[in-house]
């Protein structure tokens, strides 16, 4: 079993624990709407992991003509977005600047994915569903006032620097490509660590359960960006962080369910 | 090479005649069953066309393409009924089960005509696995649609999210049964196990009846 398959299995097991935990919560609630959306999102990413594992086992080294497991990932983004939209429905007038920034950031990411993989249709569809999730997240963060002006500025600058640096790698001389690539990884993982630390801190100290949900989901959103921009050992590290993010999201969802 | 349209006509005509003499719930069930068979033919046309366009071999098409096309095609009549006719929850579940049963029956008929029916063991497995799989995926989807409708969150992301899970489940099943061995056995058991898990959920949802 290779490292990727092992990590998939590990994450699938973490997701299974989260799935069972959420199911128990659902069964004990009168109005489990948000939890059901979250549960199905977890189920879909679990299906994706199992699909990838089985594929790796049955057809090692054979490239998929069409990555069917990506459909499960799209489902996860849509369901997590719908889960957040039950907290605060998406209205574009609520956060015009932030949503415009999100759109530009998503388009930039899609362009990079296409440049790296050459898969137009899948990358565009992934971008659309990811944008929906990010819109729902941004609206929730804005409505809950989870981020201050300084946080928004730091996030905007990080996104702009990241996209510019990744795009520059295609044009700079070969000697500069590696340092620039490592600088991007440093930014991605430093920001990931900060998002996760903020979510953990909120879980311990924050009283407003909806805010905790925002922090945990934001950590996951950044982890997704990190995962999609990483390769080799960095991808492995991002996969481990994604398992942590799922646990954080579950803990936040549990806190929110108990509070409401 | 089989002539699927001819097979459909042959099976559908007795049902069509019987519909004339039926009333109420049974009539609706038989009509939905016929619709499910028709949907199976449409899905086969679309899958065939797309696999030609994408230059996919038959095995690859069944693993990667068919789950998407089949689940989408099965969802369309359900959405039509739910949005335009707004049936009772009980009727909606019945329609979903009938469409799934029709779909899997026609698929099994075509499969048997293509590959023979000598081995009773294999035929039983096919009936219990594929037959149940189409019903289970559609039943789960209909329960999901009822849930989102009941909680007033019947939205595009909720529908597409549910559909994508059904597609992934179907794709995982097709992948598991594509190779002989333990994985195939697990694949054959998957729909039955899911049906067993769905039953308490179905009971808990307390589907309303006239």
Image: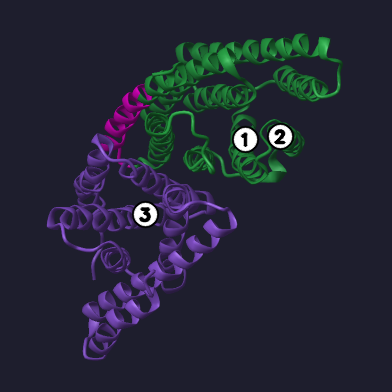
Chain colours: A green, B purple
Q: Which residues are magenta?
A: A13-30
- Horizontally, residue A196 falls left or right of residue A3, namely right
Tell me the chain of label 1. Answer: A
Label 3 Cα crowd, 10 Å radius (few <14 / some 14-19 / many 20+): many
Secondary structure beneath dot 1 equals helix
The front one of A89 and B157 is B157
- Horizontally, residue A195 falls left or right of residue A158, namely left
State the residue at coordinates (65%, 24%). A229
Q: Write down the residue under mark 3.
A: B141
Q: Write down the residue under mark 2.
A: A102
Residue B138 image position (x, y, % from top left)? 34, 57
Residue A45 image position (x, y, % from top left)? 44, 34
Residue A141 image position (x, y, % from top left)? 61, 29
Mark closer to the observer (2, 3): 3
State the residue at coordinates (30%, 69%). B106
- Horizontally, residue B192 falls left or right of residue A20, namely left
Tell me if residue A159 comes above or below residue B140 in the rendering: above
**Residue B98 visible in image:** no
Residue A134 has which mark?
A: 1
Secondary structure beneath dot 2 equals helix
Label 1 Cα crowd, 10 Å radius (few <14 / some 14-19 / many 20+): many
Q: Are marks 3 and 1 in contact (CB under 8 Å)?
A: no
Tell me the chain of label 2. Answer: A
The secondary structure making up most of the magenta span is helix
**Pointers 1 and 2 within a single chain:** yes
């Amino acid at each position: 079993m290779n490292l990727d398959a092992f990590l998939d299995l590990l994450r699938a097991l973490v997701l299974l624990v989260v799935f069972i935990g959420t199911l128990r919560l659902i069964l004990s609630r009168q109005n489990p709407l948000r939890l059901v959306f979250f549960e199905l999102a977890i189920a879909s990413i679990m299906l994706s992991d199992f699909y990838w594992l089985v594929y790796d086992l049955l057809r090692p080294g054979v490239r998929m003509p069409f990555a069917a497991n990506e459909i499960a990932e799209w489902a996860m983004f849509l369901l997590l977005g719908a889960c957040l939209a039950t907290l605060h429905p998406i209205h574009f007038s609520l956060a015009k600047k932030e949503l415009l920034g999100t759109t530009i950031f998503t388009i930039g990411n899609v362009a990079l994915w296409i440049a790296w993989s050459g898969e137009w249709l899948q990358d565009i569809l992934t971008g659309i569903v990811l944008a929906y999730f990010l819109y729902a997240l941004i609206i929730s963060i804005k409505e809950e006032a989870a981020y201050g002006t300084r946080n928004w500025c730091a996030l905007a600058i990080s996104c702009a620097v990241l996209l510019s640096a990744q795009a520059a790698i295609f044009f700079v001389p070969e000697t500069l490509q590696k340092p620039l690539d490592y600088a991007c990884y440093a930014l991605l993982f430093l920001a990931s660590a900060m998002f996760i630390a903020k979510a953990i801190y909120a879980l311990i100290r924050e009283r407003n359960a909806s805010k905790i949900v925002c922090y945990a989901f934001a950590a996951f959103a950044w982890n997704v960006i990190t995962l999609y921009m990483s390769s080799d050992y960095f991808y492995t590290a991002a996969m481990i962080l994604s398992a942590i993010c799922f646990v954080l999201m579950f803990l936040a969802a549990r806190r929110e369910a108990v509070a409401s | 090479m089989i002539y699927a349209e001819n097979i459909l006509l042959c099976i559908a005509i007795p049902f069509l005649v019987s519909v004339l003499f039926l009333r109420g719930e049974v009539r609706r069930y038989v009509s939905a069953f016929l619709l499910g068979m028709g949907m199976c033919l449409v899905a086969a046309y679309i899958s065939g066309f797309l696999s030609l366009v994408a230059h996919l071999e038959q095995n690859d098409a069944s693993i990667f393409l068919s789950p998407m096309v089949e689940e989408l095609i099965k969802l369309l009549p359900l959405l039509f009924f739910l949005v335009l006719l707004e049936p009772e929850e009980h009727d909606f579940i019945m329609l979903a089960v009938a469409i799934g049963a029709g779909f899997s029956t026609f698929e099994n008929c075509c499969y048997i005509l293509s590959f023979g029916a000598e081995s009773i063991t294999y035929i039983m497995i096919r009936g219990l696995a594929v037959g149940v799989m189409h019903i289970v995926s559609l039943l789960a989807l209909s329960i999901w649609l009822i849930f989102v409708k009941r909680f007033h969150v019947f939205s595009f992301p909720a529908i597409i999210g549910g559909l994508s899970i059904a597609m992934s489940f179907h794709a995982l099943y097709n992948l598991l049964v594509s190779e002989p061995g333990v994985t195939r056995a697990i694949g054959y058991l998957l729909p039955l196990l899911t049906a067993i898990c769905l039953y308490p959920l179905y009971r808990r949802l307390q589907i309303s009846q006239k």
